[in-house]
Amino acid sequence: MVIDGTRMLIALLIGIAVLIVLVLKTKVQAFLALILTTVIVGVIGGMPLTATEVTNAAGAKATVSIVNSITGGFGGTLGSIGIIIGFGVMMGQIFEISGAAKRMAYTFLKLFGKGREEEALAITGFLVSIPIFCDSGFVVLSPIAKALSRTTKKSVIGLGVALAAGLVITHSLVPPTPGPLGVCGIFGVDVGKFILITIVLAIPMAIACIIYARRFLSKKFYRIPDEEGNIVAAEYQAPDYEAAFHMDMEGIPGALASFMPLILPIILILINTIASALKATTGFMGVLVFLGQPIVAVGIGLLVAIFTLGRKFDRQTVLTEMEKGMASAGIIMLVTGGGGALGRIITDSGLGAYMAGGLAKTAIPLIILPLIISTAMRFVQGSGTVAMTTAASISAPILIAGGASPLLGAIACCVGSLFFGYFNDSYFWVVNRTLGVSEAKEQLTIWSVTSTIAWAVGVIEVIILSFFM
């Protein structure tokens, strides 16, 4: 049996169209839509229904079937990242209930000094969103933005958007956030290296969004919370920076306890990456390499959070909150695994090598493919996680077969998922509604443009990196 490359390519295009329709126009959930799409691509593309030896589109012989591709892709993807996702979301819940996130914000205020509230909030979001979903992170931290606005008389819109940008950028780029972890799993790239590079790339994105928030949004949309907490338009007032440094921090954990569960895993993972690169993997360094494995490192961070931040709560409260985090992680795991299943169909059919050969004959750089797919998927269906995992599933086999850098391809998938968050994006509503913005035109100006600025900076960075990777 021979799998025809052209037929498989047509099947993939039909499958992507079906996926978009299912996610946008029906009640079918994204995970089920991905699995259905995988089946449709396999059937239309001529993949065997039962295990059969075939000559795939790339001319290689293999024994494949649609079901084996689905289960193999699903399990293979989650095998490396599922545990980390679970640990990360449990840690996030402990940050929320303990007040550690609030302490982080206050610490950065003290660090940056007067007049730099936007930077303080953006960096707080930048770090907090590494293990926490940006939606919940914004809900938790937005009272700090409102409190700062009330005390400093700075616009809550500018402050809130700086916070929201910091949250969404690392949420979209830096593991152990589930989406980027899923992309790492699909491309098979080293998580430690990915963290190092994406943290550096995220900084210019955050700076651009801070500038937009401070210089444009804060002036165009001057709004502050009133005594009842309602956000209202007001006459511009000069900032009062002194009051911001007198927030009530009674009962909130200290800075060391708040930051340690987040910083310790990152340090361990970075040590692992450096030691592995230097091939120092024996003796004491071997122990550090083991501790720096992402699963072990994030697990250690979770244990630190439980026994430090969680010590003031009773056992049942801590367990209930962690289980609540696990419930929210379930769908991310399923969607990530579904993306892996779709990618395995493309790999097993040989379509990746077939398309890479075709693209190699054109002037289109291979690295542009994941950017285009992720950007398009983000725009049509809203979810950044679905966009990046779908783009990774489709483009990973093509880039690898074409000899392009898997690491850069993974980064491109994540960058594309930041494009123009609007009505079909849950975070769009969380940010705008929390900040009291109800007019559609204002919502687009305040958040959709901000997310697109981050995307545009990321695209430039990917193009620059493509000359060196």
Image (cartoon, grey):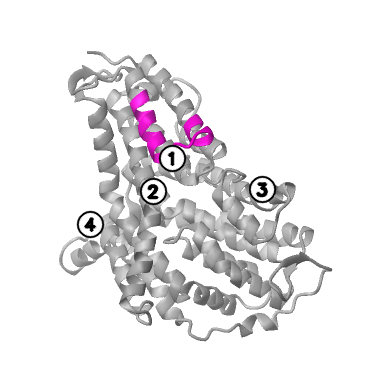
Q: Residues within 10 Å of mark 1 (few under 14, many from 20)?
A: few
- The answer, for residue 149, to whether it is visible in the render is yes
Left/right of residue 130 with respect to residue 44 in the rendered view:
right
Provide the residue designation for mark 3: 449
Is mark 2 in CB contact (under 8 Å) with mark 1? yes
Label 1, label 3: how far apart the Cα atoms are? 28 Å
Which residue is depicted at the point 55% across and 64% down? 139
Q: Earlier in the sequence, mark 1 or mark 3?
A: 1
Q: Nearer the viewer, mark 2 or mark 3?
A: 2
Provide the residue designation for mark 4: 279
Could you tell me which secondary element the residue under label 3 belongs to?
helix
Which of the 4 image quarters holds residue 302? Answer: bottom left
The amino acid type found where label 4 is placed reads Lys
Q: Earlier in the sequence, mark 2 or mark 4?
A: 4
Label 3, label 4: how far apart the Cα atoms are? 45 Å
The magenta stretch is 21-40
Is mark 2 in CB contact (under 8 Å) with mark 4? no
Which residue is depicted at the point 55% across and 60% down? 166
Provide the residue designation for mark 2: 331
Label 2, label 3: how far apart the Cα atoms are? 28 Å
The amino acid type found where label 1 is placed reads Gln
Q: Nearer the viewer, mark 2 or mark 4?
A: 2
